[in-house]
Amino acid sequence: MKYSIYQIKLSKAQYDLINAEGHMAVPAHVAKMDMTMDFSGDKIADQASEAWDNGYYTHVCNIVAENLNEVFHIGNIGPEESIERLSSMHSISVADVIIDETGEMVVVSSYGFKAFNSKLEKAA
């Protein structure tokens, strides 16, 4: 199955703003920090849905895998031939969104994956 991977990516201008005014100056950065700090996983689905609807995510790659656990494995250690890179990306981690061919959306949580529903057309 082919999975689409989305990550919150910040521009140089956003990093400059964070450096000048602090972490709270860039809403996309705040959203990612909040999801990263949700160790219980109780809020991450709602947070990811809101970040998605606000257009914070960028489609960075597609991965061919058998299941979500394999997507996570490939997105962290390969093999590279299973990854179709569309943009620069970091390894798959908490707050990243994975969408399967049926449109099911999950966010990577501290422990596993959390499903959520949102508007697919909103992402970059």
Image (tube, helix red, strand yellow):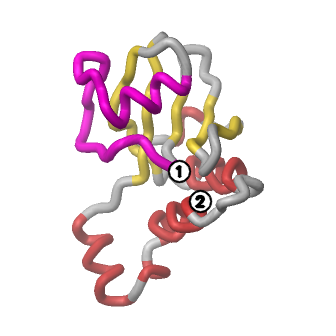
12 left or right of 103?
A: left
Q: Residue 124 location in percent, x, y?
A: 41, 42
Would you say 115 lies left or right of 14 here? right
> Closer to the camera, 5 or 111?
111
Question: What's the amino acid at mark 2?
Answer: Met
Residue 112 drawn at (x, y percent): 63, 39
Find residue 42 and report its image quarter. bottom right
> Which element type, helix, strand or loop, lies under badge 2?
helix
User: How many C-alpha atoms fall within 10 Å of the one at disc 1: few (<14), some, or many (≥20)?
Assistant: many
Decide which of 98, 76 is in the foreground and name it.
76
Which of disc 2 and disc 1 is earlier in sequence?
2
Q: Position of 52 compared to 91: left or right?
A: right
Q: Residue at x 22, y 67 (%)?
A: 12
Q: Is residue 77 magenta?
A: yes
Q: Is residue 41 left or right of residue 52?
A: right
Q: Is residue 76 magenta?
A: yes
Q: Residue at x 25, y 29 (%)?
A: 85
The secondary structure type at the circle numbered 1 is loop
Q: Which residue is mark 1?
A: 95
Q: Which mark is residue 22?
A: none
- Distance (Cα) linking label 1 and label 2: 6 Å
Toward the bottom, the furthest residue is 21
- Residue depicted at 43% across the width and 33% down the height: 5
Please state the horizontal and vertical placement of residue 97, each as a whole percent of the image.
52, 39
Task: Tell me if residue 99 comes above or below residue 25 in the rendering.
Answer: above
Q: Amino acid at mark 1?
A: Ala
Image point (65%, 62%), residue name: 38
Task: Determine whether 58 is above or below 47 in the image.
Answer: above
Residue 107 placed where, x, y %?
Answer: 59, 41
- Disc number placed over residue 35 in the picture, else none: 2
Which residue range is magenta in the image? 68-95
